[in-house]
Image: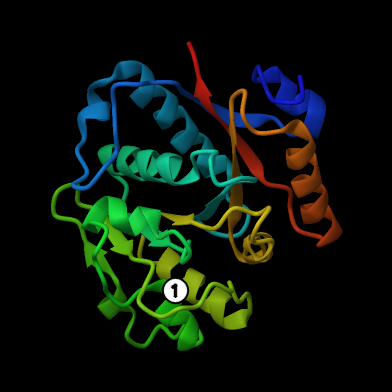
Amino acid sequence: FNKFQINSQIKDKTGIDSVGVIPHFSNIKINYPIKLDFLKNNVIIESLKKIILKFDNLKINNNTFIITSPLSSDGKTFITILLALTAKEIGKKVLLIDMDSEKKTLTKKFFDKNFEHRGFTDLKLENYSTSNIDNYILNDKNCGLDIIPAGISSNDILKENESFKLLIDHLSNKYDIIFCDTMPITYHPDSILISKYANSILTIKHNSTPISIVKHVIDEYQKLGIQAPNIIFNNIDF
């Protein structure tokens, strides 16, 4: 029993209450082009709405949320997209940023696997300059979301500095809520460092994510003096 089986285990093992659960569903896929079929499922949409509304009370730095996970199989990109679509559905102006330059899954979900456009990796090379930021933001006409794709440049290191903070602050003034899909922490601990400038959400997958790894990740936040992440429990059977 070294994996999370029930929601109450999260508080018992980590000291952190989960902000919500994402139910398991097997008949909905999120692939290019994105379709909004899941919005017809009341169980799913109500769970997601509750989480979005809780986010208003979780804002420590701004309205930007870094979505990450201990492992690559914990569903962070899936949850990021679900949260963004739900926030848009309830009337919020939403921006998605694909910071996972290794897999670029979010970008592929919206624009197909061969898509190339300047994005987050290119912003890093320009030290997060906001002077031409509109050139990096694309709008998905199907669902109405604004997206900064992963980018063209090869740059896997997440630089956290004052320029990154200025970028996030600039974008936070233009959007009601921003979701950033980052690389898994176990393989890329720099995903923790950028949480200094935003609000961190850690996704944990039911009966999959090892408890020991989650506890280690939370310890790393504490060692770095960074606010512990909020947790979303993913793939629950209701």
Please name the residue that numbered disc 1 is placed on: 170
Q: What residue is at 74 percent from the left and 34 percent from the top?
A: 16
Q: Seen from this angle, which residue lies furthest left?
A: 141
Q: Seen from this angle, which residue lies furthest top?
A: 238
Question: Is residue 176 among what the camera can see?
Answer: no
In this rendering, is residue 3 above or below 81? above
> How far across and how far down the image is residue 75, in percent?
49, 39
Instruction: Give the quarter of the image for residue 176.
Output: bottom left
Question: Residue 212 vs residue 148: left or right?
Answer: right
Image quarter of the N terminus: top right
Q: What residue is at 23 percent from the left and 23 percent from the top?
A: 40
Observer-nearest of 23 and 26: 26
> How far across and how far down the image is residue 70, in percent?
65, 45
In this rendering, is residue 238 above or below 54? above
Q: Secondary structure at mark 1?
A: helix
Question: Residue 126 vs residue 222: left or right?
Answer: left
Q: What residue is at 47 percent from the left and 86 percent from the top?
A: 125
Q: Around disc 1, counting alpha carbons within 10 Å, would you say few (fewer than 14), some (14 to 19), or many (20 or more)?
A: few
Kind of residue at badge 1: His
Observer-nearest of 76 and 194: 76
Observer-nearest of 61 and 33: 33
Instruction: Give the quarter of the image for residue 111.
Output: bottom left
* Snapshot colouring: rainbow
Q: Seen from this angle, which residue lies furthest front?
A: 114
Question: Is residue 170 among what the camera can see?
Answer: yes
> How far across and how far down the image is residue 13, in percent?
80, 28
Question: Residue 46 vs residue 62: left or right?
Answer: left
In this rendering, is residue 90 above or below 134? above
Observer-nearest of 150 and 2: 2
Q: What residue is at 26 percent from the left and 79 percent from the top?
A: 135
